Image: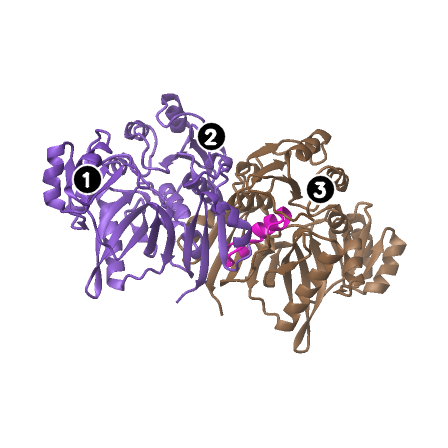
Chain colours: A brown, B purple
Amino acid sequence: MSAQPLAPGAMIGIIGGGQLGRMLAMAAARLGYKTIILEPDIHAPAAQVANSQIVASYDDPEALEQLAEFCDVVTYEFENVPVAAVQWLEAHVAVRPGSKALEVAQDRLLEKTMARDLGAETALFAAVATRSELDTAITTTGLPAVLKTTRLGYDGKGQAKLVKPEDADPALAAMHGQMAILESFVHFDCEVSVIAARGLSGEVRAFDVAENVHRNHILHTSTVPSTLGAEARAEAIRIAAAIAGHLEYVGVFAVEFFAVRDRERHRLLVNEIAPRVHNSGHWTEAACAISQFEQHIRAITGLPLGDPARHSDCVMENLIGDDITRVPGLATESGTVLHLYGKSDARPGRKMGHVTRISPLT
Amino acid sequence: MSAQPLAPGAMIGIIGGGQLGRMLAMAAARLGYKTIILEPDIHAPAAQVANSQIVASYDDPEALEQLAEFCDVVTYEFENVPVAAVQWLEAHVAVRPGSKALEVAQDRLLEKTMARDLGAETALFAAVATRSELDTAITTTGLPAVLKTTRLGYDGKGQAKLVKPEDADPALAAMHGQMAILESFVHFDCEVSVIAARGLSGEVRAFDVAENVHRNHILHTSTVPSTLGAEARAEAIRIAAAIAGHLEYVGVFAVEFFAVRDRERHRLLVNEIAPRVHNSGHWTEAACAISQFEQHIRAITGLPLGDPARHSDCVMENLIGDDITRVPGLATESGTVLHLYGKSDARPGRKMGHVTRISPLT
């Protein structure tokens, strides 16, 4: 634990060069810090706004040595960074968050087990490596259920739905021999997420709970405030804080929940933990004095965490693929905060930017 | 006049690498544009966040050729860019705003004369090149008065106050033989500024009037809303729009006024015109959906101008020199938006950053 925050001019290493790294680099610049991006793609969005880029793979030994040498602290912008690379770095420079959160977030089984062990509810789940384990797992979860690879899945990739027993074979085949987890299908009322930060001192500060709508397994909108009651919102933040404390986490993270209607209230099931800034927190840059990106930079540099209070209600909408052509029209709307990522190729399904519409607090 | 806005990925050239260029480059990035900075100082704040930098003087012919070749539009972040350089560029690439605004803003005499010709009030003034002209000028302005070089003055440099006739000699000596303007000393009630944008279509949109306090001739705070009445605020915006129209201006500009108490209302005297984003508009990034920086990028790229409405009241405070050491303390305050410029050397009088405190609309 460092008593003094990093001074302006300190160098922050960011592993990963996507839009999250880009927005982190801009937040770092606003606090007077410099950034260096480790990213093999020379056209990466983050490199365009960072001080410099190391063009190499995320586990390139020379690149990691350079990061350790040049940086005062290293962070990452996506959860599929090789754990071994981060472990090597941790021996040579402050890495926040560290490898522990990465290990858990890279494995759905560890993730769900941790959440359950911390007293949070999850979907029913069971590990699946073989066909016979899948049969046993179905007796645990019931049907419908969702089979997912335990590792390297996001935006719906590596997932198969089982509605009837005959779906077992094709679902298992879709795992391509990888270790999997079967999860009971949750009939949720809505999906929500908490974006929170844990500082070096252990303090946790959470932004307001956002209500998220996905389309084709990709986040479509985040709306704040959510339709959750005050009790469920507090519960979501309590669970997030317990997870961060358990992981001795430093930085911003997201916990995604399914909210299941239970008479007049909502029960919350932990769905996913992201050890990084998160798409469902992009609204913070438009509706709070402190964005999730600045909050992360504050946490990892040892600055005090900022006040996550909202000054406005808002709806964030992702701009996917061709949505980018809507920009001139969106630019005519009042109370609309546009944010594009500098990607030249608007492929279908690619996140090109987002727009947040703010309105007075209700 | 271009019918289509520049597409994301287009290149914007920015002449000047200071904090205004830095904040313009970040705003450009958020709209998906790339930036190239022309600036001789390789450690310049803007270069840290831009795609690239041409390290050369502002009138270097090769550098200007490169700007013309690589850029879809060129802008500038300070008003002392050599007019000839901008005129050369105008023949080869879109330059917004163009050289006309620069010429006027570089000469206090042209500036004040234009304001007066457009029907706006100014301090009493007269041109001064010689000692006898100074004597005549004093009969126009009365005493006290302020003698200023007509060109290249900012933050109080190149100014001398005349309280009594004997001050004439030292005041004239302080001009070092440069052409000067004598202005009557204005007993103002407050200083205010309008930050407005004029788009390619001629549309003008103004942010709310800010009330400014200077210390040692450097802006200390900007407060919004100001203490001006609705009539005076509307008048300030009307004058700003007239000036922009007259200059066929494209982009964001500032008009600074002295507000003189006249019984129950305020009379406004144009003090200075800045053909660029302005320190007294930094509050917009914290209290509006659209900052002055984004508004400038929208104007020069042909995107629709954004809605300049405020979502919060605010006070912006400049962080000068050693004020930078207050950052960790400021970071603990709620509703506080920090912005540092990445300058390593906190010299006295140097603008290191600013902080904006927001509060609900009154």
Nearest to viewer (mark 3 / mark 2): 2
- Residue type at mark 3? Val
Measure the alpha-carbon separation of dots 3 and 2: 31 Å
Mark 2 belongs to chain: B
Real-space Cα distance between discs 3 and 1?
70 Å
User: Mark 2 or 1, which is nearer the eye?
Assistant: 1
Q: Which residue is mark 1?
A: B167
User: Horizontal and vertical percent for residue A63?
Assistant: 68, 31
- Badge 3 is on which residue? A81
Badge 3 element: loop
Residue B66 among those drawn in magenta: no
Looking at numbered disc 2 in the image, what kind of residue is underneath it?
Gln
Chain containing the residue with disc 1: B
Residue B211 visible? The answer is yes
Classify 10 Å Cα crowding around label 3: few (below 14), some (14-19), many (20 and above).
Answer: some
* Alpha-carbon span between mark 2 and mark 1: 46 Å
Q: Which residues are magenta?
A: A283-303
Quadrant in the picture for the C terminus of chain B: bottom left
Q: Which residue is denoted by mark 2 in the rendering? A: B53
Q: State which quadrant residue B134 falls in.
A: top left
**First in residue order: circle 2 vs circle 1:** 2
> Pointer 1: residues within 10 angstroms few (<14), some, or many (20+)?
few
Residue at position x 70%, y 29% from top?
A62
